[in-house]
Image: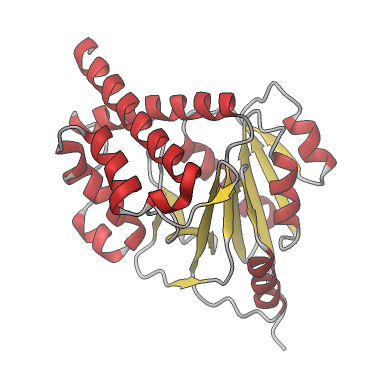
Amino acid sequence: MAERLRLAGYVLTRNEAANVARAVDSLSTVCDHVVVVDSESTDDTVAIAEKHGADVVIHPFTGFSAQRNFAIGHVEATYQPDYILCLDADEWLDDALIADLRESVSRADLTDDVYLLHRQIRFDGRALRWGGFANTWLPRLFRPGTARYEDRVVNEHLSLTDGATIGRLKGRLVNDDVISWEDHIAKHNRYSTLEAQARVALRRGEAQPTSLRDALRHPYLRRRWLRQNVWDRLPARPAIRFVQIYVLAGGIFDGRAGFRRALFEAWQEMCTDLKAEALQRTS
C-alpha cells in the first residue's frame, strides 16, 4: 500500500477574528499542519488562530501575491509536504470535499500537480446558483515547486510551471465573506483601490499582461485575458456588469441576494473606474 500523503495548509489573515477559527478548523480536518500568515492584525485574529492549533507567522503586507508566495515558501521549507492547500479566511471545505481529500490522502491517490476546487459563493445568507458565480474552479491544492502566484497586488492568479498536470476534486470550496456589511463594504473598497492601481500599472507597461497563450492553456486565466483586452475598453462598464449578472446570467433567480450581489459588483466596477481615472490624472 502506498504511503499516506502529507498535506500542509495556509490561510492569509488581517483582522479576521470573525472568520479565522472556521478556516483553520476546516484545514485541520485534512492537513497535518496549518499555518496562518498574518498581516499585523490589530484584533484577536492571532490569539484565535493559535487557540485552534495553527502555527502563526507575522509578515508585513506588501501585496496579495507577495504574501501568498511568502506563505508557500514558508510551508515548503518548514514542513516539506507532498501538497499545499490554501484557503482564504472567509472560506471552508464542505463535507464532500473533506471526504474526497481524506480518502485521496490516505490512499495516496493524488497524482496530478495541481487540483482545482469548485467554489460555492454564499452571499446575503444564500448560496448563489446564478449570476455566473456557480461554476468557478480555483487552483488551491498543488505540489510544492509547481506553482507560484503572479506579481499582482490584487485578484492574483496561480501561475503553473510548464507541463503541470491539472485535476479536480469532488465537493465545494465554500466562500462567505459577509459577516458584517460595514466590513464587507470597507474590504471591497480597498480591493477597488488595489484593482485601480493594477489597471493603471498595466496601461503604463509596468505590469505583465496575461498572454493569449496562457489564457488558452489555463481556463481560469481566460477571464483575466478578456478583462484586459476586451472588458476594460468598453464604455459604461458598471451598467454592463449589472445587466450581465442580474439579467443575462440569471442573477434575478437568486432573489434578493442576486440583486444585491449584482449591485455590489457594479458598484465595485464604478469605484475601480473612478480611482483609476484619478490615478492617471495625478501621475
Q: Where is residue 146 in the image (x, y as percent from the top left)?
A: 46, 61
Who's the residue at 55% across and 71% down the image? 169
Q: Quadrant of residue 137?
A: bottom left
Q: Which residue extends farthest top?
A: 282
Quadrant of the snapshot with the C terminus: top left
Q: Is residue 140 above or below residue 178?
A: below
Q: Position of residue 119 (x, y in %)?
A: 51, 57
Quadrant of the snapshot with the N terminus: bottom right
Q: Can residue 153 be seen in this view?
A: no
Q: Nearer the viewer, residue 277 or 104?
A: 277
Quick check: 169 left or right of 229?
A: right
Q: Quadrant of residue 205?
A: top left
Who's the residue at 49% across and 69% down the image? 113
Q: Is residue 225 above or below residue 102?
A: above
Quick check: 159 left or right of 240?
A: right
Q: Which residue extends farthest right?
A: 51
Color scheme of the displayed model: secondary structure
Q: Is residue 5 above or below residue 109?
A: above
Who's the residue at 68% across and 41% down the image? 36
Quick check: 281 left or right of 222?
A: left
Q: Can residue 252 be seen in this view?
A: yes
Q: How many marks?
A: 0
Q: Which of 195 and 121 is in front in this view?
A: 121
Q: Nearer the viewer, residue 235 or 210?
A: 235
Q: Quadrant of residue 173?
A: bottom right
Q: Position of residue 129 (x, y in %)?
A: 47, 57
Q: Position of residue 193 (x, y in %)?
A: 38, 24
Quick check: 170 left or right of 23?
A: left
